[in-house]
Image: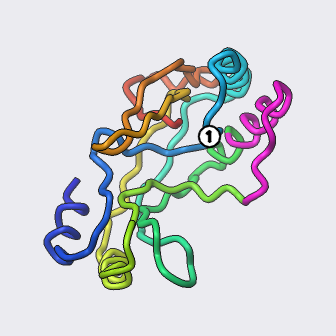
Amino acid sequence: MQHIAALRRAVPHAQASWARAASIHLTIKFLGEIRASLVERVTLAASKAVEQIGPFKIEIGGTGAFPKRGMPTVLWIGVNDLSDELGHLHKNLELECARVGFPREEKAFHPHLTVARLRKPQGSRTLAATHQEMEVAPTVVEVSDLLVIRSELNSEGSRYSVISRHSLAAKASGGSGGHSCT
């Protein structure tokens, strides 16, 4: 991703764990560590959550950092829910996960794409300020699938594997090859 490369050149001394382009994803619900015996429940919840939702478009663009105050720890690119279908999918997934025994998220849903995690304070404010000053041209993408993803941490960062894929097809828009949400 060009944005990450530009940030790394602009603030080379900042210590960050950078997202690899192939692993950048939109998390709709993070479950944390769960027992293998519960994976089937998550898959069922995801399947139910997409039943009445067809493919939709989101806009990727804008930059920011978490937390809003204090030392930044996450750099992100924003996600604009153009049709409110992403919000609808999120609500459905929360409801279906709660039905199979997973707690609802108490924090408000703020869709974003994480591009870096800042591990040390040295250079983090400079890196966050540079990130927020850089323009990320708005790009519209179609979301056509909901994925249940397994994340495993290792020395190179996170490794992701798809557990199940759930097509958004209720209101078919006549196309395929869109992007996925996790």
Farthest residue to the left: give it. Answer: 9
**Left or right of 91 in this view: 148:** left
Question: Which residue does the image show at 67% across and 19% down from the upper left?
Answer: 47
Nearest to the observer: residue 139 or residue 110: 110
**Left or right of 19 in this view: 72:** right
Nearest to the observer: residue 38 or residue 24: 38
Question: What kind of colouring is applied to the model shown?
Answer: rainbow
Question: Which residue does the image show at 54% across and 38% down from the upper left?
Answer: 56
Task: Give the residue number, with chain letter if any, for mark 1.
Answer: 32
| Residue 162 position within the rendered picture, expressed as x and y whole percent measured from the top left | 46, 23
In the image, residue 41 above or below residue 2: above
Disc 1 is placed on an element classified as loop
In the image, residue 151 above or below residue 52: below
| Residue 75 position within the rendered picture, expressed as x and y whole percent measured from the top left | 41, 66
**Left or right of 49 in this view: 130:** left
In the image, residue 22 above or below residue 72: above
**Left or right of 44 in this view: 162:** left
Q: Give the residues in magenta.
A: 90-107
- Mark 1: which amino acid? Gly
Query: Residue 111 sits in which quadrant?
Result: bottom right
Circle 1: is it few (<14), some (14-19), or many (20+) Cα within 10 Å?
few
Farthest residue to the front: give it. Answer: 155
Report the number of numbered marks.
Answer: 1
Say whether residue 79 is magenta: no
Say whether residue 101 is magenta: yes
Question: Which residue does the image show at 36% across and 78% down from the upper left?
Answer: 124
Nearest to the observer: residue 155 or residue 14: 155
Question: Which residue does the image show at 32% across and 58% down from the upper left?
Answer: 17
| Residue 121 position within the rendered picture, expressed as x and y whole percent measured from the top left | 39, 79
